[in-house]
Amino acid sequence: MSEMPTCIGCGAVIQTANKGEVGYAPPSSLTKETVICQRCFRLKNYNEIQPVSLTDDDFLRILNGLGTQDGLIVKIVDIFDFNGSWLPGLHRFVGNNPVLLIANKVDLLPKSIKPGKVIHWLKREAAALGLKPVDVLLVSAHSGRGMDEAMTAIERYRKKQNVYVVGCTNVGKSTFINRIIKQATGEGEVITTSHFPGTTLDMIDIPLDDGSAMFDTPGIINHHQMAHYLDASELKYIMPKKEIKPKVFQQNPGQTLYMGALARFDFIQGERSAFTVYVTNDLPIHRTKLEKADELYANHKGKLLTPPSEKYIDQLPDLVRHEFTIKEPKTDIVISGLGWITAQDANVIIAAYAPKGVEVFIRPSLI
Ligand code: GDP
C-alpha cells in the first residue's frame, strides 16, 4: 500500500474508512494532486465545523501538545452529562494556560433553576476534579443563550493569544464553534484552514481578527457513556432535545423504578421519600415492587421495558448493581449519559443498576 497523503488544511493523515474520524476524505479525492480532509473542506467552503472524534492515545497526544502552546483553553462540557463529558486530567496537560469552562446545553435544565447556583456547583465540582478555571459560563450553543457573554469572555481571557477549544464528543463543541463562526464572520466571508505550524496536532484553525486563531480539536469518545450501548435509532430515548421535565416519585422502601430496560432504581431502606428523576422526557419509567423486579426484567425487557427494543436488547450489556447509603439530603445518583435521580431525603439506602461499563455515582444535587 502506498503511503497516504496528508491534508493540506490541518495536516492530518488522510483516511477513507471512517467518516466521523480525523482525516476522512472520500476515496475519489485521492486522485487529486492535493488532498483536503472533509472537515477542512467544509470549513473552507461552508464556514462550518464538522464534529470528528479520536482515539484515546491520539487525544493524549493533542493534550500534550496544548501544554507547549500559549493560549486560552476553552473546555466545553455537557451540563446534562457533566461527569460523563468531563475530560479527566486536562489540568495536568494545559501547563500554565488559563482554562475557561463552558457548560453547554443549559436549555435542557428546567427553566426554574437559578443559573448562579449551577455556576457555583460547576466551580465546586471542577475544583474537586482538580481544575481551577478562570471563569465558568452556562450557554446553549443551540439556542444562542449566553453566547455573547461567552464570546466576550473568550476575548477577555485570551489576551490576544490563540484559543483552543476542547471537549469530548457530543458536548456540542461543533455547534458552539459554528455559532461563533457565524457571529464573527457574518455572511460571505470565507474562512481558510492552515497547517498548525511545526506539529501535527490535527487541529483546524479559525482566524481571529488580530492574527491569532481559534483551534478546533477533535473530540474524544468517553467509553463509559450510555450512548455507546444503544443503536443510533434509539439515542433519542436517552439524549434530551428539550427542557427536561423532572418527575417526582414518592417511594416506599421496597419499590423499584425501571427506566426503560436501561436502568433500574431500588429504594431499599429508609422512610417514605421523594425521588426526582431527571431523564429525557421520552424515556418511559415503570414502577414496580422490588420483590418482583428481577422477574419483570427477565420476562419483559425489550417489550414492556423499552428502550432498547426487542431488536437491540441483546446488544445491551447486563445491568450491574451499585448500592449507596445516602447520608445527605439532596443527593444525585447519576447514571452517566442517562441522567440522574435526586434523593430529596437523607438516611436512605438505594441501589442503582446500569449496563456494565456505564458509570454510576453520587454527587451533591445540581438542581
Ligand atoms: P460535538 O461532537 O461536541 O462537536 O457535538 P455537536 O455539535 O455535533 O452536538 C452534539 C449533539 O448535541 C447534537 O445532537 C446537537 O444538536 C446537540 N446540541 C449541541 N448544542 C446543544 C445545545 O445547546 N442544547 C441542546 N439541547 N442540544 C445541543
Image (tube, rainbow, N blue to C red):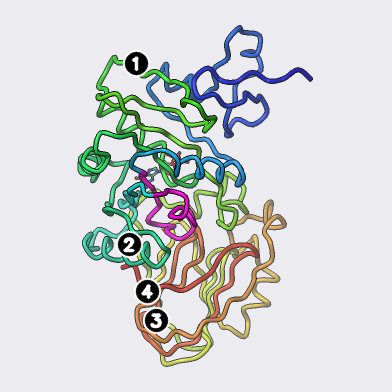
Q: Amino acid at mark 4?
A: Pro
> Of label 3 and label 4, which has the lower sequence position?
3
Per the image, the residue denoted by label 2 is 122
Per the image, the residue denoted by label 1 is 190
Residue 12 found in image quarter: top right
Quadrant that contains the C terminus: bottom left
Residue 15 found in image quarter: top right
Residue 85 highlighted magenta (yes or no): yes
Per the image, the residue denoted by label 3 is 250
Per the image, the residue denoted by label 4 is 364
Element on which disc 4 rests: strand
> Of label 4 and label 2, which has the lower sequence position?
2
The magenta-colored residue range is: 73-95
Q: Report crowding for label 2: few under 14, some 14 to 19, many 20 or more residues within 10 A (C-alpha).
A: many
The one nearer the camera, 101 or 212, is 212
Residue 109 found in image quarter: bottom left
Quadrant that contains the N terminus: top right
> Of label 2 and label 3, which has the lower sequence position?
2
Question: How many angstroms separate mark 1 from mark 4 (CA)?
Answer: 46 Å
> Of label 2 and label 1, which has the lower sequence position?
2
In the rendered view, tell whether residue 278 sits above or below residue 347.
above
The one nearer the camera, 249 or 358, is 358
